[in-house]
Image (tube, grey):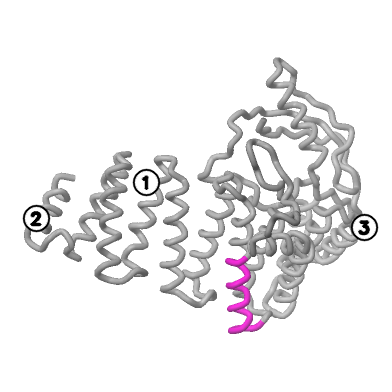
């Protein structure tokens, strides 16, 4: 630390406070302070190093990427998520500017990392209005998909991770609760005669109203890409069909979901590794969706209280929890509140049902523990 401080002081005296040679030692000094949990000092030096990099190399200089990463980490360590959000946006712009084509692996990594941050920020209620974050996520994926389709065609395998992101966004939108105002959830209602909807609102309503179709189209395009690729393995085809079945199941379109689940079985049943694969996917009912899209991240959720609740229940052929029994003992009012929420949570849960010899079946006496926020 002392050596870095001395180096900064020497350069300032010899070359002046705006010397481009200061950017690196200032950044190293910021990293050093961050490792010592001195985030305020880290932020001060990192901000200065980023400023010098931009002045000497341009607004989107690649040399500032690592500095921005560390600045974001410093803001997060302080709990200043709004400032971290601003820097995440700028970091994505820097990375995208350097690697314009969405098929570029570094551009893909940058897009998926930024999309994950936006998802986490949305779940953590970081914004005063929540729907613009979903519109931003939609634009992020849509732009990359359109660019790739124009450059490589609709059957390019490079589209697959972006389509997966679009599918996960559709899951988020499917449970959109409305905007939060003074502690209450209010529906994102249509404007009255006295209100004018913003462009973002109008676009979000369109996305929300057609969300099932948008998710379905992304899932079907994934299947088409795999079918067009002769090197695709049966497991990949089965997984794509399974994801499609889960989407129908999530939306309670049970007849279609059951047919697709049984098609998945038929795709895999004669394959060499069929037993292990089918056992993993269908031996017991599994909660939907089978992704981490609703998993919180670095931005904490508003609810602080959690309780682990044990329940016994049956999962029907339609993937619904029936005959629910609470196994956790009620010890106080808080536990009763958690149990009540757990019951409603399970009633609303959608499951992928079990299959027995290729046929969807009900499964009794499932016992699970759930971490419930209340």
Residue that numbered label 3 is attached to: 255
> Which percent across, then down, holds residue 222?
71, 70
Q: Nearer the viewer, residue 147 or 262?
A: 147
Q: Nearer the viewer, residue 260 or 249?
A: 249
In what element is the residue under mark 1? Answer: helix
What separation in Å lies between label 2 and label 1 (alpha carbons)?
26 Å
- Choose top left, top right, bottom left or bottom right for residue 94: bottom left
Decide if residue 221 is on the left or right side of residue 31: right
- Relative to residue 198, is residue 100 depicted above or below? below
Q: Residue at x 78, y 24 (%)?
A: 327
> Which percent across, then down, holds residue 154?
68, 80
Numbered tag placed on residue 268 in the rendering: none
- Badge 2 or badge 1: first in the primary sequence: 2
Numbered tag placed on residue 10 in the rendering: 2
In what element is the residue under mark 3? Answer: helix
Disc 1 packing (10 Å; few <14; some 14–19; many ≥20): many
Which stretch is magenta?
Answer: 139-153
Decide if residue 215 is on the left or right side of residue 251: left
> Which percent across, then down, holds residue 172?
68, 53
Q: Residue at x 31, y 66 (%)?
A: 63
Decide if residue 320 is on the left or right side of residue 29: right
- Relative to residue 155, is residue 244 depicted above or below? above
């Amino acid at each position: 630390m002392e050596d870095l401080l001395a180096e900064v002081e020497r350069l300032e005296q010899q070359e002046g406070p705006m010397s481009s040679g200061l950017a690196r030692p200032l950044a190293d000094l910021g990293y050093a302070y961050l490792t010592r949990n001195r985030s305020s000092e880290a932020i001060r030096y990192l901000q200065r190093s980023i400023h010098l990099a931009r002045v000497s190399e341009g607004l989107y200089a690649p040399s500032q990427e690592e500095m921005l990463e560390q600045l974001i980490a410093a803001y997060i360590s302080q709990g200043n998520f709004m400032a971290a959000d601003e820097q995440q946006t700028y970091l994505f712009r820097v990375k995208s500017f350097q690697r314009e084509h969405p098929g570029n692996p570094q551009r893909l990594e940058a897009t998926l990392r930024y999309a994950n941050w936006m998802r986490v920020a949305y779940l953590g209620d970081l914004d005063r209005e929540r729907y613009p974050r979903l519109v931003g996520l939609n634009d992020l994926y849509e732009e990359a998909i359109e660019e790739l389709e124009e450059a490589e065609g609709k059957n390019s395998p490079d589209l697959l991770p972006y389509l997966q992101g679009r599918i996960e966004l559709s899951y988020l939108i499917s449970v959109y609760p409305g905007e939060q105002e003074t502690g209450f959830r209010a529906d994102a209602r249509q404007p009255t005669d006295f209100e004018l909807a913003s462009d973002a609102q109008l676009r979000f309503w369109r996305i929300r109203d057609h969300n099932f179709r948008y998710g379905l189209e992304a899932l079907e395009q994934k299947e088409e890409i795999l079918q067009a690729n002769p090197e695709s393995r049966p497991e990949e085809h089965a997984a794509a069909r399974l994801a499609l079945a889960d989407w129908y199941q999530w939306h309670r379109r049970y007849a279609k979901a059951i047919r697709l689940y049984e098609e998945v079985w038929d795709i895999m049943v004669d394959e060499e590794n069929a037993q292990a694969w089918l056992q993993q996917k269908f031996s017991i009912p599994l909660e939907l969706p089978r992704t981490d899209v609703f998993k919180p991240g670095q931005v904490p959720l508003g609810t602080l209280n959690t309780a682990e609740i044990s329940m016994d229940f049956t999962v029907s052929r339609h993937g619904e929890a029936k005959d629910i029994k609470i196994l956790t003992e009620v010890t106080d009012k808080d536990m009763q509140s958690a149990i009540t929420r757990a019951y409603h949570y399970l009633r609303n849960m959608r499951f992928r049902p079990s299959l027995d010899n290729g046929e969807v079946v009900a499964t009794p006496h499932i016992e699970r523990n759930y971490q419930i926020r209340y």
